[in-house]
Amino acid sequence: MIRRNEQRMENKPVILVVDDQSPNIELLEAYLVPQGYEILTAASGEEALEKLSANQIDLILLDVMMPGMDGFEVIRRIRQNIALRQLPIIIVTALRETENRVKGIEAGCDDFISKPIDKIELLARIRSLLKVKAYNDVMNTYRNELESMVTRILSPERIMSAEKNQGPGRNPSSHLELLEGNEELGELAINFNHTLDRIENAYFFQKQLVSDLSHQLRTPLTSMRGTVEVALQTARSAEEYQAVLESNLAEIDRITALVNTMLMLAKLDAHTEHLRYSSCDFLKLLEEIIGELAPLWEEKSIHFIYRFFQNNRVEEYQAENALVPRLPAFVHDLFIMEVDVFRFKQAIINILDNAYKYTPYKGRISIELYPEVTGDAGIRCFVIMNNGPSIPAATLSRLFTRFFQEDISPGRAGDPAAESKSGSVGKMARGFGLGLSICRRIVEMHQGKIRAFNPETGGA
């Protein structure tokens, strides 16, 4: 059953390109044929429907603005055919208005790509939808097998035969088992539903990743291209060319970091990466992280305070000649936990990064420790606060949303080098808006919760 589908996937995928403009078709053929796709073309909606009925098509690239039958009507006609309702359709159009995109979604398209066409984006969207189609083909095979099994088990002939063999006075429970199916059928149905859920989730996260990458990469790539074009317009000195290359190299490093971060977040979202739990002394791990980031704290003369809450008592610990206060052994013992140390460390670093960013010069970061919450000894609570600016009310609900960046100027009153120092503050402030999103995902994977708030005493 599966081998038949795998053999189909080894064949060239067939893409139907529908456009009334020959140059557009030729451009798409130039992009797609070298990638191993077989291309069929149609110059109108009517011709597209004819090609579709006569050929096995894997995906359609469809222009909207065509004489006669437009692209929206073509989609509606296709979706009326039950056998073609899952056929991937990408609208290729110069239309950018929200109304037209909504119209395309309502008609039944799967994705959009705007003109002028970006080759990398086009290929990524096609690969994504073809992969989903391959999964759907396998699932349709499973569905047919399941329906066939149900038909065989619950056929009138088998029920009548069972009633005849059962006879009066026999135990009716076996008759009930027959009507309900058998364990194999139930197991198959459960596995089938789980597989569908995984495919739907994978498709959603893959589509989200492609959309996010496309949006985030367009601006820096356009900027880099503009910089190079300006540099090439007139003859310049070697030093000026070097400055342009160094600037673009720094931007490439930033783009690489963005892509790696987004891929990691996509893996966390899609649950494709399993946590590797081990015993961890949280306070020791926290101390190690703060030590590794010592240059940052020293740059702004930031100091740390620990507060330990237990049995309505509060113990405060401050360091006199060290960066981090030393805590009693029994406090460490209360915060031994089973976590994925690598991922948990990522979350802590992102939280401390955010605290550092908005802590003023000679400021304070407080770490509050609660060994149990509301009497549950299995739950630990950590609160990391700084005495910088509070978080605006409108920002609190969006703080953990990916790509969200709030321009809060860190209070740096009293910093003698505030006017000239760029240091790590400027670099860190130019982040991607993904750090706290990653934090939340890691914490949730550990069955925990994370939130932001403004203490009554100030800070965040």
Image: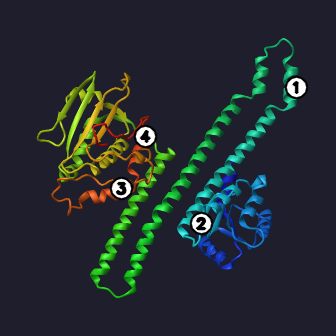
Which x, y percent locates residue 45?
A: 76, 68
Which x, y percent locates residue 37?
A: 64, 67
Q: Are marks 2 and 4 in contact (CB under 8 Å)?
A: no
First reached walking from the N terminus: tag 3 or tag 1: 1
What amino acid is found at the position of numbered circle 4 in the picture? Leu
What amino acid is found at the position of numbered circle 3 in the picture? Asp
First reached walking from the N terminus: tag 3 or tag 4: 4
Residue located 84% across and 32% down the image? 155
Q: Are marks 3 and 2 in contact (CB under 8 Å)?
A: no
Is residue 326 visible in the rendered structure shown here?
no
What amino acid is found at the position of numbered circle 1 in the picture? Met
Question: What secondary structure is found at the residue carrying circle 2?
Answer: loop
Distance from Cα at disc 2 to Cα at disc 4:
41 Å
First reached walking from the N terminus: tag 2 or tag 1: 2
Which x, y percent locates residue 84?
A: 75, 56
What residue does disc 2 label?
A: 96
What residue does disc 1 label?
A: 160
What residue does disc 3 label?
A: 407
